[in-house]
Amino acid sequence: MWGIYFVERPEKIDFINGMNDMPLMQFFYFLFEFLFQVYFIASFLAIRKSKTVYLENYTNPNISELNALFKITILYYALHFIVLIRWLVTFIFGWGKVEIRDWIVCLDGFAFLFCTCWYLFVALNNPEFFRGVNSDLKPITEVVPKQKNSPLLVEEKSKEIEFLKDFMLEKEPYLNSSLTIQELSEQVKIPVKDLSTLINLYMDKHFFDFVNEYRIEKAMQILKDPSQNELTVLEILYQVGFNSKSSFNTSFKKYTGKTPTDFRKQTL
């Protein structure tokens, strides 16, 4: 490599033209592709883990940011196949087919530019993109070792579950739209780790679903009450702790099989 600086211009051109056929360059091409695949697999795993942590610790039902990030990652992964096609064309036809490669490079460049602009547009319209999930949090299965169920342990957990359910019905902490498992832990005087284990493992529910079930039940009571018929669906969803109409409708239909409007019409 050092010798190329001290030769004549024609030798330099020949060297540059022949670089792509060198075993070392081909090795780096394969290394790049390998690292690229590792990076994307790690990205998908990180997003999935973040979603699990989110559902186990937060109750805000709007997880569109994580879903959008997952779709963007999928899209960039799909666009990478354009690069693979370019390499395939080069491998089959060699470097002589300049026109075909140039067209693929143009398509590749415009596609990545469009997707990057779209990503920035989505990110700017969703500032939550830059807040993320607390990086110190981990899925409960990674924090708590598996325990063998014994009659004593089952009885103890059953009492804790009953206490938690009574507290949710009596104090209605779920009405707070930004309720987190840390805040509920302080209210029920149960350590966060123990509360998370109780809900996510022993009740076999995400904290997200556990809280939203109470919100939906509360909304159902209001929708069935003729004296509150003047309240709109939007007013009700904010009243019971939701902060998005689309999220409320999705959760309500998942829990009842009906939309809030249809449920009200059938019960009144």
Image (spheres, helix red, strand yellow):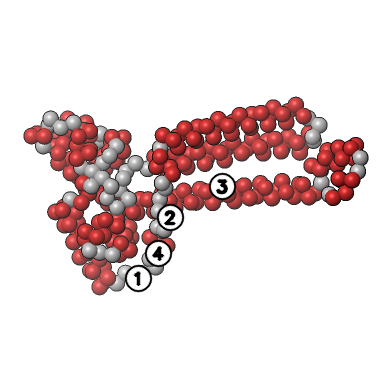
Seen in the image, is 80 located left or right of residue 174? right
Q: Mark 3 — residue?
A: 40
Find residue 148 and name its label: 1
The one nearer the camera, 126 or 245, is: 126
Residue drawn where x is 48% and y is 39% of the image? 71
- The numbered mark, 1 or 2, whose residue comes first in the sequence reads 2
- The numbered mark, 1 or 3, whose residue comes first in the sequence reads 3
Question: Are the residues at dot 4 and dot 3 in contact (C-beta closer than 8 Å)?
Answer: no
Crowdedness near tag 2: few (<14), some (14–19) or many (≥20) residues, C-alpha within 10 Å: few
Q: Mark 2 — residue?
A: 135
Q: Quadrant of the C terminus?
A: top left
**Amino acid type, mark 1:** Lys
Label 4 and label 3: CA atoms lie apart by 25 Å
Q: Is residue 82 above or below residue 32?
A: above
Mark 3: secondary structure: helix
Image location of residue 179, percent across then percent down: 27, 50
